[in-house]
Image: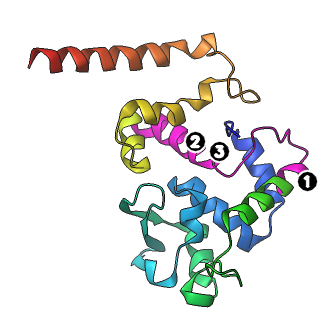
Amino acid sequence: MKSRYLTDAEIALIFANLPTERRLIFEISLATGLRIGDVLKIRARDVRSVGRGEMLIKFTAEKTGKRGECVLNGTISKHLFSLRRGKKGFLWASRSKSGHITRQTAWNWFKAAAKAAKIEIKGVSPHALRKSFAVKLRHERGIEAAQRALQHTNCAQTAIYAYSDIYAGADPYAPVLWCQIDELIDLLREKLIQRAKKDLS
């Protein structure tokens, strides 16, 4: 299933239907762009305070094997610090063989919260939060910043996430909205200039 872009209002409604400890999983994904599977694998040893209410998380992306770091602050940081350490040091421990909550379980929690919020659930999944993170970062600091944060090897891959807000929200296959076509034109112009420079070098 292809995850669709979720609006801030939809995310707020979903989060409102999750208890604090479960909601924290998805808040971290939204704040950092981490895949849910990587959030669930966070152990106590991966988290440390870096001052001023900030928490540094070290991780290794399961999908790519790439290592990275991200920083959390505010309420999310406080809640993370207060979590009990469970089996094998996982912050979201379970009795499963892995020792932590599974992605499927997290997916079920997210889906149930969306249903409770009376949101159209077609295309709704925790992976949508990674798209929302990329969109916000693109608006604030540009697509290159989103590419670095998502650890993508090329900008085209990042564009699938960072420009997901220019598609009609309910249909991930919908055409580009005309009111936002300028953003895609700018991206294409940038890539064409880069390619021309590369060809001349």
Pinpoint residue 180: horizontal percent, then vertical percent. Answer: 57, 17
As drawn, 174 above or below 43: above
Q: Residues within 10 Å of mark 2 (few under 14, many from 20)?
A: many
Q: Residues within 10 Å of mark 1 (few under 14, many from 20)?
A: some
Per the image, label 2 sits on a secondary structure element best described as helix
Asked whether residue 46 is drawn in magenta, I would say no
Q: Which residue is mark 3?
A: 128
Question: Looking at the image, which residue is at 39% across and 49% down?
Answer: 151
Amino acid marked by disc 2: Lys
Sooner in the amino-acid sequence: mark 1 or mark 3 = 1
Residue under label 2: 131
Q: Main secondary structure of the magenta part?
A: helix
Residue under label 1, please give it: 116
Marks 2 and 3: in contact by CB < 8 Å? Answer: yes
> Quick one: quadrant of the N terminus?
top right
Whole-number angstrom distance, CA of label 3 to CA of label 2? 5 Å
- What quarter of the picture does the C terminus occupy? top left
Q: In the displayed structure, does residue 62 sit left or right of residue 28? A: left
Point out the tag, 1 or 2, that comes first from the N-terminus.
Answer: 1
The amino acid type of the residue labelled 1 equals Ala
Instruction: Answer with left or right where residue 112 lies relative to residue 24.
Output: right
* Residue 57 against residue 198 in the figure, above or below: below
